[in-house]
Image (tube, rainbow, N blue to C red):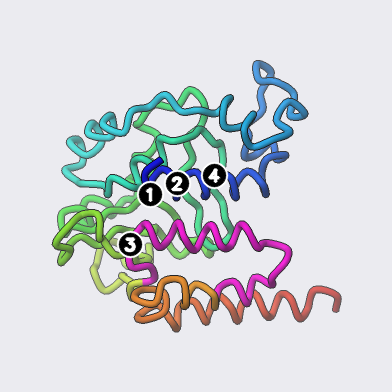
Amino acid sequence: MNWKDKLIDRFYRAFWSIYGKSPYYLGFHNDLPNKSTFNSYDKIKEYYQCQIEPNSYQLIESQYDIKYPSLFKEWHSFQHFHEGDLSFVRLPENPIGNTVQSIAKSLGWSFSKELTQEGIVPFAEEGNNTGPYVFDQRNATNVEDSPIRVYDYTYGGELNGLSEVIFSNFKMLLECAIHYLENLGRISNSKLMIDFLHIDPNGAGYTGIEYWKSWSESYKYIENNKHS
């Protein structure tokens, strides 16, 4: 496997280690096997292998005049999953029976056209319902290196609704997500958010420091009041 395949496989292995028994993430319906069938990552991987080719995303890119980083497309087309909520971010799901049009849900905001015309591409949702995660391609010399920001939906398309850069690129988002999933329940969420600063020193640990410290403080408040 090349580095992209290894990174993506690491993500899904960690993802299903947490959510592999959840009907919300597995998407059970009457025509799907009983969840006891999926008692290992290899079995989940086999059943949920995605049939969408990464180049199929060109349909969405042409329709909306945008470009997604290739790593994002390869990650999304690697496996089916019916829910992408990781608490701090809600990644776009890829349900069984999915067409590539489902990823366009992230472009369904009323202000999406205003953003995409400026080179800002929504692709996921922030965990606190602030608005979409966006690829900021305005100054990126390569689409692959598009930094990630949060857009506050209350600004309705105005560019001052953009946050600071919170991840330097999608690769760093996946690295942080893997760390979060691999350590969920073993390390406090408040500490995991601070770990992002060290995993991604050029994004989360640079302009994103205050953003992730805010997340850490929110988790710390919940942790300290859990038993009160």
For residue 12, the mark is 4
Instruction: Give me the residue at 74% from left, 76% from top.
Output: 223
Question: Where is residue 13 drawn, in percent x and y?
Answer: 58, 45
> Which quadrant is home to the N terminus?
top left
Comparing labels 4 and 2, the label whose residue is closer to the camera: 2
Image quadrant where residue 228 sits: bottom right
**Which region shows up in magenta?**
166-193
* Disc with the residue nearer the chain's start (4 vs 1): 1
Question: Which SS class for mark 2?
Answer: helix
Most frequent secondary structure within the magenta stretch? helix
Crowding at label 1, few (<14), some or many (≥20) Cα neighbours within 10 Å? few
The reply to whether callout 4 and callout 1 are in contact (CB within 8 Å) is: no
Question: Between disc 4 and disc 3, whose residue precedes?
Answer: 4
In the image, 72 versus 222, the foreground residue is 72
Q: Nearer the viewer, mark 4 or mark 1?
A: 1
Q: Amino acid at mark 4?
A: Tyr
Question: On screen, 19 above or below 154?
Answer: above
Q: Earlier in the sequence, mark 1 or mark 3?
A: 1
- Identify the residue under disc 2: 6
C-alpha span from label 1 to label 2: 5 Å
Q: Disc number at residue 169?
A: 3
Disc 2 + disc 3, Cβ < 8 Å: no
Q: Give yes or no for contact between labels 4 and 2 (Cβ–Cβ under 8 Å).
A: no
